[in-house]
Structures are given as structure tokens and as C-alpha cells.
Amino acid sequence: MKEISYPIKESFYSIQGEGHYYGIAAYFIRFEGCNIKCDWCDTKESWNIEKKDFVSIHKILANINNYQVKTVIITGGEPMMWNLYPLIKKLKKKGYRIHIETSGSYPIKEKYMDWITISPKKIKLPLQENYRKINELKIVISEENDFLFAEKQATYVESTNCLLFLQPEWTNIFSILPKIISYIKKNTKWRISLQIHKILNIP
């Protein structure tokens, strides 16, 4: 039987820079392929799927074994384009905590996932069913109209335990950040997420 493999743009051990778990050490697996392709995306190199980049589950696990890893973050591109169950099942057997970062535009099969973050995009909105499964809603703010978009997305979240984050779009951070701070002070259900790995120049 041919071993399952996935298109991986990159994998590396670093620091989570965003959201609730910012500052923790984590192993990142960045999948190739994206169905949205935002203009301001900072990982455009992950959009295209290259045949040469497919990596077997065995090799993925072997690479992780080189580090003192507790948390594995699966991101993209859009990782939910792929059937992640075989990979996640193997990772959980190894004792890793599994975090997923997705746009929410594909079904999320949450079995074995410990933390699910969706970052909705206007171009292709999350499936409504996914709002019931998430732990974290993260909205990228690049202009003032994005605050209205954020509030609309928050109305779909059913769990009171789901954390709500506003994150400044990196290339526009100095003009939009003061507005986010002011907005959160008036709308205290929101928190701010900063890409601290970029601020600290951490890969």
C-alpha cells in the first residue's frame, strides 16, 4: 500500500506569534494549496501545489522527532483542503497537542484536534457549521470596514468560550493598529493579536 503523503511547503520548529498561544514553542507544518489567495497574504509561496513537495507521514514524523516538541501547528495555505485525519491520528499517538489554523471554508473534522482557529476571509466565507467547532476566531484588520466584517463573523460563534481576536494586517500595521486599540477599548469582547514573530524577527 502506498504511504499517504501531503504537499508541504515548509516545516520548522519556532515560536507561535499569533493568537491565544503566542509565545509558545511549536512545530509548524505549512501545507501547500489555497482556495482564497488574499492580496495581503504573507505566505503566497504556499498557494501553489508542487508535486516535488509531497512528504510522507513517516518523514513528517521523523522530522518532528528531531526537536523537543509538545505542540504541532498545522497551517497553510489551506490545510483543510486535505484529509488530515491519518496524519493527526499518528501525531496524537506520539502525544503531540494539535493546533489547526484555517480559513474555515472547508469542513473541519475536529476529531483529535486540540485547538482550532479560523481566520475568515471575505472572498470565501467559512462554512456555518465550522463556527460551532472553533476555539479561536481571528480577523485580520487592514481597513476600517473590516471591523464591521469582524462583528458579523462574531455573531455566528455559538460558544462563549471561543476567543475573539483582531489582528492588524502586517504591511498596514502602523496606520491600523491605533484604530484596533481604540476599537477594543470600546468593544471589550475582542482581544488584540500581534504577529510577534515578525516583530522579534523569528522565522
Image: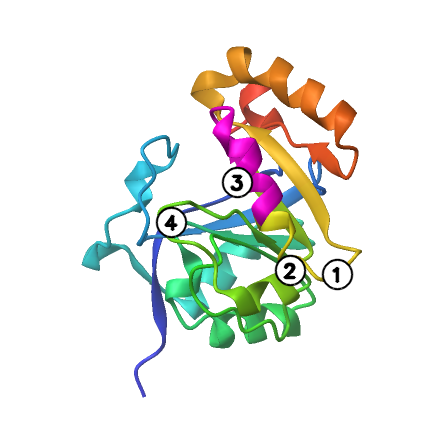
Q: Which residue is mark 3?
A: 149
- Disc 2 marks a residue whose amino acid type is Ile
Q: Which mark is drawn over residue 70?
A: none
Q: Calculate the distance from the C-alpha at mark 2 to the C-alpha at mark 4.
A: 18 Å
Q: Calculate the distance from the C-alpha at mark 4 to the C-alpha at mark 3.
A: 22 Å
Q: Which residue is mark 4?
A: 77
Q: Considering only vertical position in the picture, is 69 above or below 174? A: below
Q: Secondary structure at mark 4?
A: loop
- Disc 4 marks a residue whose amino acid type is Gly
Q: Which residue is mark 1?
A: 159
Question: Quick check: marks 3 and 2 in contact, CB under 8 Å?
Answer: no
Check if residue 148 falls in the magenta segment: yes
Which mark lies nearer to you, 3 or 2?
Answer: 3
Look at the image and give the residue range highlighted in magenta: 140-152
Q: Which residue is mark 2?
A: 134
Question: Quick check: marks 2 and 1 in contact, CB under 8 Å?
Answer: yes
Which mark lies nearer to you, 4 or 1?
Answer: 1
Way the structure is coloured? rainbow
Q: Calculate the distance from the C-alpha at mark 3 to the C-alpha at mark 2.
A: 18 Å
Check if residue 117 falls in the magenta segment: no
Residue shown at the point (37%, 30%) measured from the top left: 40
- Disc 3 marks a residue whose amino acid type is Phe
Residue shown at the point (49%, 26%) measured from the top left: 169
Residue 187 location, x and y as percent? 75, 32
Asked whether 91 or 103 is in front, the reply is 103
Q: Secondary structure at mark 3?
A: helix
Residue 86 location, x and y as percent? 48, 77
Q: Earlier in the sequence, mark 4 or mark 3?
A: 4
- Tell me where residue 7 sits by quadrant: bottom left
